[in-house]
Amino acid sequence: MSAKNGSIKLVAGNSNPALAQEIANWLHLPLTKAVVRRFADMEIFVEIQENVRGSDVFIVQSTSFPANDHLMELLIITDALRRASARRITAVIPYFGYARQDRKVGSRAPISAKLVANLITHAGVDRVMTLDLHAAQIQGFFDIPVDNLFASPVMVRDIKERFDLANVMVVSPDVGGVVRARGLAKRINTPLAIIDKRRERAGESEVMNVIGDAAGYTCILVDDIVDSGGTLVNAADALLANGAKDVYAYISHGVLSGGAAARIASSKLKELVITDSILPTDAVVKAPNIRTLSIAALIGEAIGRTAAEESVSSLFD
């Protein structure tokens, strides 16, 4: 595959090499030879070992844990490519870190998502491609084009293959995720319920009510990020207490920090399904009720369309 105005080059950082290789395989392209390593004091060193002059370059790099290291890798790779005369640089960021800090939550608090957008833009990125942004308005934080892809087609395909849709109910784990959950429910033509919760402090949540009749349904919780897992575990307990048959969860980004994988494994969740936007840890891989869906084909198709100057939004029509 080639770009409309030059060759396609794929460069991988260290955040998710497995996903980068899958995308390269899907596009039938080799990963561009590059060195991304650390000096003794942990400074990042990057060297692009192939000619990229005039090329359409895509950097595959999630800004997941350790977020700061992976963000710096992205910025330095971008600078190296810009100085090597790449024609266009697209940052493919399957998981966009700092997205949860998209507004001031109190006096003298930062809007870190905007700061990160500025850093990426000023480093020399021409376009950003990401997946299921925590807040869609973050696209407006960039002064360059942003393609916000959606994992819903991958999830819908998996749900249709595994469930009897006549007995399925889609559930939003909080009021803020209703639009996302409603979109999925509409795609598979199922009813919708909402968990009304009160969050006392960051990382903790208390389920208060289930809005909707979940009795007898197989419930599917839908959200963009699972971090501590507390919200999902509490939501599953509330749904089962309200008569749900089983509870599953489909989440775009499996952050799963700390003991989250163990918390999910010991919970009443039948299964947590995440994408590979973030490289799964050993704990996640070993968890018996956590399964990963590949988004390589979705991102690969979007990269191919971007390079050929074709529509990306039509992927989700």
Image (tube, rainbow, N blue to C red):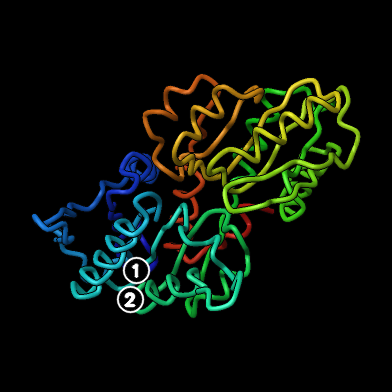
Instruction: Point out residue 160 in the picture as x, y percentages from the top left corner.
Output: 70, 29
Going by the numbered disc 1, the residue's amino acid type is Ile
Who's the residue at 74% across and 46% down the image? 181
CB atoms of marks 2 and 1 within 8 Å: yes
Of residues 278 and 130, the one drawn nearer to the viewer in this rendering: 278
Whether 112 is drawn above or below 270: the answer is: below
Location of the C terminus (image quadrant): bottom right
Label annotation for residue 89: 1
Label 2 crowd (10 A; few <14 / some 14-19 / many >=20): many
Which residue sits furthest left? 40
* Residue for badge 2: 124
The local secondary structure at tag 1 comes to strand
Of residues 132 and 316, the one drawn nearer to the viewer in this rendering: 132
Going by the numbered disc 2, the residue's amino acid type is Gly
Instruction: Point out residue 122 in the picture as x, y percentages from the top left corner.
Output: 35, 79
Instruction: Point out residue 73 in the picture as x, y percentages from the top left corner.
Output: 27, 60
How far is disc 2 from disc 1 in space, using C-alphas?
8 Å
Whether 80 is drawn above or below 50: the answer is: below
